Amino acid sequence: MSSHVTRRTIFTFLGPSVAALIIVGIIPLGYALWRSFYDFNLTRLARTKFVGLDNYAEVLTSDAFWGSMSRTALLFIISVPIQIAIGLTIALVLHRPGLSLLKTFTRLALVLPMATTYAVVGLLAQVMMNQKYGVINQILGWIGIDPINFIGDPTNAFVGVVFWDIWQWTPFVALVLLAGLSTVPTEIEEAATLETKSHWTVLRYVQLPFLIPSLVAVLILRTADTLKLFDMPFTMTRGGPGNATEFIAVLIERIGNRQFDIGLASAHSIIMLIVTIILARIYIHLFYKEIR
Amino acid sequence: MARAASYQDRNRWGELALLLAICLFCIFPFYWMVTTSLKTQVVALADPPVWFFTPTLQNYVQVLFEDNVGISLINSLIVAVCTTALAVGLGCPAAFALARFEFRGKTDLWFWFITNRFVSPVVLAFPVFIIAREIGLRDTHLALILMYLTFTLPIVIWICTDQFRAIPYDLDEAALLEGASQPRIFWSICLPLAMPGVAVSSILSFIFSWNELLFAYILAPRDAKTAPAMAVTFMEGYDVPYGNIMATSTLIVIPVLIFALLASKHLVRGLTMGAVK
């Protein structure tokens, strides 16, 4: 299905994209790698010097790094299973026949949270979760729960981030799983529903095997996006109070942009990059059969 | 049997309630955002929050004409449109090559394009900040337009490659027999047929560029400041202007929500780099 053409033709078509991505994607990484071996702080440029692997040693022994990594992991461990549980429920309901108009409307409603500007989600969190003026505390009050200080208390701020992460990404998980459900051949599904009345049996033995690819995609992409998570916690709490919502990307931003320590920030970045490349490798290996 | 029927019925009501709850959950924050944007500061800071009030547009007048949010929205628009145009211009030929040509290193190239989806902007932001400062691109639209290629270009390439693959190769062969060159086949035959893919990838590029915060916050602190970066600065200080913040948020979010609804069937495809169709 493809033709053999001259090197020049290939170069004409691909050259510009490759050049552009080298300029914006590779050169900065090269620069970061180089600077990660230096003591390089914008506030004392005169004292810049080569320090070898010192920055890496500092990262791997720093409480801030491991603290932010475990917060990032904790966020993933708490919110992703909830997203999958609710998302799967939504997908199964949407997959059933009937109520088609409402279901079309629901699908459109699901698109809204994941398209919302991530920084705006942080602002919504600030406004809706305020202890005194926030509507979420008002609603909690109706069911007898005292106002919660979501922004000012470390544990509650973390819960706040979990809540908005669930709000924004459960729809995504639901739609990915719905796409997975639609790969189950209709005949098999119908035959199974004739055999048993239990939705659980159908899910476990008929639908689940077809859902595995979608579930794996969700897990890998949510891992990558949780590692990237910056906008929402940053606008909501700036990583605070203390460092309760300082996830890995927020930490790197603080080191680079608020402490001006580019050398140390670069070392963090390179470590992040290695994790990222491993994730991407797995993802590609599993999902892009056409390139193997 | 009667028991089964009532079970079915109860299920129907449960399903209806669940669907309505999902819609409410997704939409309520937007409702609250828009209503708060129509409140005066006094009403917005009512304790407990009020649900019914006389709406006013004064927050919009304030943020658009006094607080530079208008300018930042124009900056966002310039950056999102230019980066989308550039990504489509560069990405379509590349996608055509990946769909039609065989060559060594294709797999690695593909891998590299997709990997960009996983790279955190924070990894690139500081080196680019230093480089941009050195070459005089700090605080310019151009710096943001170029950096946004790191995520817009892979999306365009992925979606358009898929689209080109869907075009029958017979068309190329017929044109080759007529003596057409590859650029001519690309431009006159395949590109017009790939327009749906180009449109979808443009919309997705626009959404992701418009939403971006980290590069904008670090690379464009003043003159080229985009709307999300502008919104962040509102939260600084003590007397937080709720109405203004929500008016700004509404202005930022409305264009992306319209585009997202237009491309609703493809948003998931874009977010998963096409692994999920």
Image (cartoon, coloured by chain):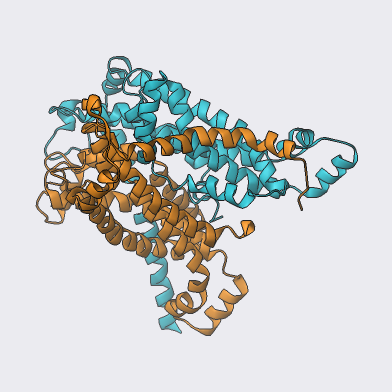
Judging depth in this view, the residue of B149 and B247 nearest the camera is B149
| A138 sits to left or right of B212 | left
In the picture, residue A270 is in which quadrant?
top left
Q: Where A170 sits versus B151, above or below?
A: below
The colour one sees for chain A in the rendered image is orange
Residue pictured at 55% horizontal, 63% vertical? A182
Judging depth in this view, the residue of A109 and A98 nearest the camera is A109
Judging depth in this view, the residue of B161 and A95 nearest the camera is B161
Q: Where B99 sits versus A180, above or below?
A: above
Residue found at the far top of this picture: B66
- Chain letter matching colour cyan: B
Looking at the rendered image, the quarter that the C terminus of chain A falls into is bottom right
Q: Position of residue A118 (x, y in %)?
A: 34, 40
Q: Position of residue A49 (x, y in %)?
A: 27, 33
Q: Position of residue B277 (x, y in %)?
A: 56, 55
Residue found at the far left of this picture: A146
Q: Position of residue A250 (x, y in %)?
A: 26, 42
Residue pictured at 18% horizontal, 26% vertical? B41
| A201 sits to left or right of B56 | right
Residue A117 can be seen, yes or no: no
Residue found at the far right of this picture: B178
| B230 sits to left or right of A64 | right
Residue pictured at 43% horizontal, 56% vertical? A279
Q: Where A149 sits versus B245, above or below?
A: below
In the picture, residue B215 is in which quadrant?
top left
